[in-house]
Image (cartoon, helix red, strand yellow):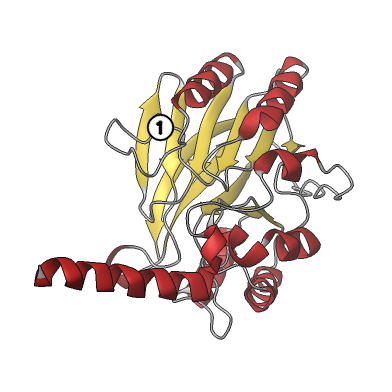
Amino acid sequence: MRSLRALLLLGAVLLCVSSCRYGLDELFGRPSPVDERVADQSIPAPVAPLVADPANYVFIATADTHFGATEDPTNAASFRALVSSQGASFVVIAGDLVETGIAAEYARFTAWTASLGVPVYVTAGNHDLYNEGWTSYRSTLGRSAYSFTVGGRSFYFVDSGNGTVGQAQLDMLRASFLNDANPKVIVSHYPLYDGPDALYYRLTDTAERAALIDLYANGHVELLLEGHRHVTHETILGSMDEWLCSSLVGAAGKGSCVIVTVSGGQIVSVVPTTY
């Protein structure tokens, strides 16, 4: 009986802490469903990066930066140095940009991305939507779902911040793919698959996941860049290469990311890197 009371008390404390920091109504669900976010075409789309040689370039992918309101995450400065040393043309970040969704965190995040010296492209994660975080996300970062083309390759940023892409976004992707024969890179927070045991961390709807795998496999998707698990991990899905990108705090306290090299118009390497 004592152990039961202790467990109940611990649960109540955790619930209180979560409700204070993340918003009680957002502990198990998020406002601003994904269908509403992606349907808002009044939000300006990001401009595609200007790459000096669209057939030969490097970009860096990471995720889960989790910027707080009062200090930058560990290794934020080291990542800035890595971007410079690699001569990256742009950076992609697969969601969970901030910790609790408040405006002060978005301010710190955008100040950091501005300091990287290259264009930065992002999509929404679950943490970004806490405390009605979509309001700050929308005003500071713009759309959570969009695409652009570099050379002969298309980049699609998919909003999976609620653990689902939603029917509206799935329909939009299908329509876009019909008119886009380019090889494609998908950036999304929640993993599409990530192995048979990753039940909690991947997209929650099995039918939706199957539909996406079919769409991607037949739509010339070659690379998936995702986050959420705070690990760097590769899964081969037929002709698709799925990479989970770790956070600014990776193994043994070091930051972790993947460096993608395009040469002769082809993706020739995806290299996990600590810094």
Q: Amino acid at mark 1?
A: Tyr
Say what secondary structure mark 1 lies in. Answer: loop
Instruction: Say which residue label 1 marks.
Output: 193
- Considering the image in quadrants, where does the C terminus appear? bottom left
The answer to which of 68 and 53 lies nearer the viewer is 68
* Residue appearing at x 82%, y 47% in the figure: 45
Q: Is residue 106 left or right of residue 79?
A: right
* Image quarter of residue 139: bottom right
| Residue, far right | 42
Q: Is residue 109 above or below residue 120?
A: below
Pinpoint residue 239: horizontal percent, then vertical percent.
45, 20
* Residue appearing at x 62%, y 18% in the figure: 219
- Considering the image in quadrants, where does the N terminus appear? bottom left
The answer to which of 199 and 25 lies nearer the viewer is 25
* Residue appearing at x 48%, y 20% in the figure: 210
Q: Is residue 191 above or below residue 209?
A: below
Pinpoint residue 172: horizontal percent, then vertical percent.
74, 27
Residue 53 visible from this viewpoint:
no
Q: Is residue 251 left or right of residue 110?
A: left
